[in-house]
Amino acid sequence: MKEDQQGQIQRQVEEVAESLVISEGMELVDLEYRREGRRWMLRLFIDKEGGVTVDDCARISRELGDLLDVKDLIPQSYVLEVSSPGLNRRIRKKEDFSRFAGQRVQLLLSSPKEGRRKILGYLVGVKGEEVVVTAPEGRFSVPIKDIAKANLIYEF
């Protein structure tokens, strides 16, 4: 499968999944659709105030599986997994960068900024279209569009 077709399928599935998850009072944190070995994996990470339960994940899995079967968006067989985002939750949305201000975070950049592709520090928040992080090496302002991946880093 070509990368653009895979991306199109992921966007369509994400639209359906987000609508379902929101209707159930939850948040779609992340969605991954990719080939792993010989099989295709569709992973959803969901959350809600107070955390999701195994029953929440099972319900979303059943309902989404039924919706995807009816809409026939994915042409090949796949494995559907629904789970909580875990302690090192992925951050994707501008609102999340504001919501998790004060938390420890790791940013992976799509291209180096000041010679760095990885920034590990504390999330200050969002200023315009930039994420602000304080790290031992200083304060960084990174355009959201330049962040390839961002995760909370849980501190024990």
Image: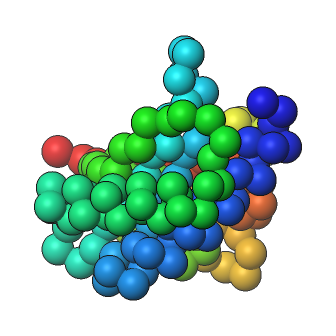
Residue 115 position in % (x across, y down): 78, 35
Residue shown at 24% from the left, 78% from the top = 49
Q: Is residue 114 visible?
A: no
- x and y percentages locating residue 21 in the rendered image: 40, 73
Judged left or right of residue 47, residue 110 is right
Left or right of 113, for residue 60: left
Q: Nearer the viewer, residue 37 or 48?
A: 37
Task: Please say if 29 is above or below 32.
Answer: below
Q: In this view, does 47 lie to the left or right of 107?
A: left
Q: Is residue 69 above or below residue 111?
A: below
Report how many numbered discs are placed on residues in the image. Answer: 0
- At 67% from the left and 79% from the top, the residue drawn is 127
The extreme top residue here reads 37
> How far from the left and from the top, in percent, is residue 100?
41, 70
Horizontal side of 102 relative to 15 (left or right) equals left
Asked which quadrant contains residue 32, the reply is top right
Colour scheme: rainbow
Q: Quick check: 120 above or below 130?
A: above
Instruction: Say if residue 1 shows up in the picture.
Output: yes
Q: Going 53% across and 23% down the picture, which residue do you hit?
A: 39
> Where, quadrant-wise, is the N terminus in this rendering?
top right
Q: Which residue is drawn at 68% across and 46% down?
A: 148
Residue at the extreme front of the image, as rendered:
70
